[in-house]
């Protein structure tokens, strides 16, 4: 089992397969990724990474990016991860832009769950955030995902003071008659978004308190489930979740490691730099790679120190996946 110096155990890997994205979210990549900086992991490297982490106790892999669906070989990647001995669950985060066309191929390849980003239910606000006037298309694709063979569908919504806070009730009403989990994510400061963060950050705890006042109750989750909190309400079919990275003790239940699209291990979303795994992603270096993972994991910091405006080397989340 992968365990760090603070006794935290790691069963979950977030794998960024590309840092390219076809959206221009104003808190992440408003101008796209500079051409010179693109990177994506080869199928071969993905296979070596999955095998090494699985041999050390990783059971769940989230495919992320950038936008994973910009890769034409995405179904092959899903299948490769799914067929890796020890990997029990392969899940993905997507903006849904290509979802209606490729959903069946992802399901056929064995994808277990999808987190779909949707930051507003107002078409104009959606466009202002993402640079895409395609909310209706996304909502149709989400309905298809709900009746697909993919077992779990969750929606990710970043809380943004100047964009979606006034329409929060609309988002919450969405789960009244539909069995979806809507997850509110607290906006995180990155190297590139300091001004945007200052004018848009909303504490997830404030929204959580509002929900509790209206009858939402926190559900009990296993500690191994990670730092997300979930709430249910007798009058609502769906659930509401919170990812509150600025809350006290958030990092205590950290159960995840990250590999970037350039093959670097990141022990924290906001670490100073990654550890290059690529020299060890070749046949014959499996044990060396596993020993290296155990060794560097001991340097994982106790916290991301986001509260102190530490953003490490993370310019935006497309580099690593959210
Ligand atoms: N392209 C995919 C998508 O849009 O879901 C996957 C990658 S994206 C980086 C993953 C998640 O991170 C999305 O839900 C996105 O909204 C979120 N995200 C990006 N930048 C963020 C930030 N600064 N703070 C909080 N969440 C962020």
Image: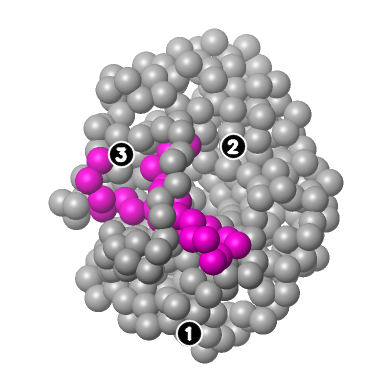
Instruction: Name the residue nearer the viewer: 147 or 293.
Output: 147
Relative to residue 235, is residue 91 drawn left or right? right
Q: Is residue 201 visible?
A: yes
Q: Is residue 77 left or right of residue 217?
A: right
Q: Residue 282: horizontal and vertical position, in percent?
A: 62, 21
**Residue 156 in view:** no
x then y, percent, for residue 317 = 42, 55
**Magenta segment boundaries in residue numbering:** 225-249
For the residues labelled 2 and 1, the Cα–Cα distance comes to 32 Å
- The mark closer to the camera, 3 or 2, is 3
In the foreground, 195 or 107 = 107
From the viewer's perspective, is residue 163 above or below residue 98? Answer: below
N-terminal of the pair, mark 3 or mark 1, is 1
Q: How many marks?
A: 3
- The residue at 41%/33% (across/down) is 223
Q: Tell whether position 232 is magenta.
A: yes
Residue 13 percent location from the top left of the image: 52, 35
- Which mark identifies residue 61? 2
Which of disc 1 and disc 2 is earlier in sequence?
2
- What residue did someone put label 1 on? 125
Q: Residue beneath label 3, please?
A: 251
Upstream in sequence: badge 3 or badge 2:
2
Picture quadrant where residue 242 is located: bottom left
In the image, is residue 85 above or below residue 116? above
Q: Give the image location of residue 248, x and y in percent.
A: 22, 46
Q: Residues within 10 Å of mark 2 (few under 14, many from 20)?
A: many
């Amino acid at each position: 089992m992968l365990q760090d110096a603070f006794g935290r155990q790691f069963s979950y890997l977030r794998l960024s397969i590309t840092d390219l994205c076809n959206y221009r979210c104003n808190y992440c990549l408003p101008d796209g990724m500079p051409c010179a900086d693109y990177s994506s992991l080869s199928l071969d490297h993905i296979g070596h990474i999955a095998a090494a982490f699985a041999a050390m106790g990783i059971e769940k892999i989230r495919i992320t990016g950038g936008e994973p669906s910009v890769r034409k070989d995405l179904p092959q990647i899903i299948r490769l991860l799914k067929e890796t001995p020890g990997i029990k669950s392969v899940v993905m985060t997507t903006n849904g832009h290509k979802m209606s066309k490729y959903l069946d191929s992802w399901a056929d390849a064995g994808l277990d769950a999808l987190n779909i980003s949707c930051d507003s239910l107002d078409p104009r606000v959606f466009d202002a955030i993402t640079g895409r006037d395609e909310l209706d298309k996304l909502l149709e694709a989400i309905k298809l995902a709900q009746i697909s063979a993919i077992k779990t569908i969750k929606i990710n919504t970043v809380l943004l003071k100047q964009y979606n806070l006034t329409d929060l009730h609309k988002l919450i009403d969405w789960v009244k008659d539909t069995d979806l989990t809507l997850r509110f994510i607290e906006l995180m400061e990155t190297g590139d978004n300091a001004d945007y963060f200052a004018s848009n950050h909303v504490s997830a705890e404030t929204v959580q308190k509002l929900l509790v006042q209206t009858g939402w109750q926190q559900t009990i989750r296993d500690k191994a489930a990670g730092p997300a909190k979930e709430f249910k309400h007798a009058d609502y079919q769906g659930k509401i979740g919170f990812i509150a990275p600025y809350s006290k003790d958030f990092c205590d239940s950290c159960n995840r490691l990250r590999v970037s699209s350039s093959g670097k291990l990141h022990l924290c979303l906001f670490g100073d730099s990654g550890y290059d795994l690529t020299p060890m992603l070749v046949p014959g270096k499996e044990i060396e790679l596993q020993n290296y993972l155990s060794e560097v994991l001991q340097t994982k910091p106790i916290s991301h120190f986001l509260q102190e405006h530490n953003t490490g080397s993370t310019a935006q989340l497309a580099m690593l996946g959210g």
